[in-house]
Image (spheres, rainbow, N blue to C red):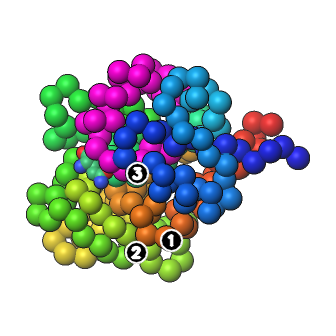
Amino acid sequence: MTAAPEIGVLALQGDVREHARALEAAGARTRSVRRPEELERVDALVLPGGESTTMWKLARAFDLLDPLRKRIEAGMPAYGSCAGMIMLADRIRDGIEGQETVGGIDMTVRRNAFGRQVDSFESDVRLSGIADEPYHAVFIRAPWVESVGAGVEVLGRAETGSNAGRIVAVRQGRLMATAFHPELTGDFRVHHYFADMVRRATEQED
Ligand code: GLN
């Protein structure tokens, strides 16, 4: 039997500790990732919520952008929440000038999309394949997914208010992203789902 896979949490900015706690509750081992050497050691990566413009600038300053892109292209599982969803998007709208992402998921994400009307809100979301009972989702200056390519599976959509129908959870192969913050609610079904995906991916490679 091999050791449980180790899931890194990108620790440049944002709710790093909350993700580490949620992953551990889901049975994963975790490690903070700030440097390219730390990225090389992990089996998978979580990109936390926070502020994508700051995360991008720090990732660039720490020489992490290219290593992140390479590992994702090579098949490393990754999950991004909120700002992390923006980081995993191939295309963004309403970014600041020059803002780059790591990319990986064939989608266009609009920053602060819900935030134009309300800064934060909570809503139940049905997450296909993840949660039989609706997931109580917390959105904070959240993006939404404006469009997805053919290879992207939509896992969940906003269900209430004028934004009902907007895509808020997606998966493409070993990459997944949510516009909301499952690390903040104590309901770790999304982290369990990701940890299971990572376990299966590492078993395939052994
Ligand atoms: N609005 C933030 C951004 O652009 C994301 C907010 C969040 O992660 N809670 O990165």
Splitting the image into 4 quarters, where does residue 158 fall?
Answer: bottom left
In this rendering, would 65 be left or right of 44?
A: left
Of callouts 2 and 3, the N-terminal one: 3
Q: Is mark 1 on a helix, strand or loop?
A: loop
Measured in 3D between alpha carbons, the distance from the residue under mark 1 to the one under mark 3, in whole angstroms, is 16 Å
Q: What stretch is highlighted in magenta?
A: 45-73
Q: In which quarter of the image is the C terminus?
A: top right
Toward the left, the furthest residue is: 117
- Which amino acid type corresponds to the residue marked 3 in the rendered image? Asp
The residue shown at (25%, 36%) is: 53
- Which amino acid type corresponds to the residue marked 1 in the rendered image? Asp
Residue at the disc numbered 3: 15
Splitting the image into 4 quarters, where does residue 174 fall?
Answer: top right
Task: In the rendered view, tell whether residue 187 sits above or below residue 112.
Answer: below
**Marker disc for residue 118:** none
**Marker disc for residue 187:** 1
In this view of the protein, can residue 90 be seen by the observer?
A: no
Of callouts 1 and 3, the N-terminal one: 3
Of callouts 1 and 2, the N-terminal one: 2
Is the C-beta of the residue carrying label 3 under 8 Å from the nearest atom of ligand 1? yes
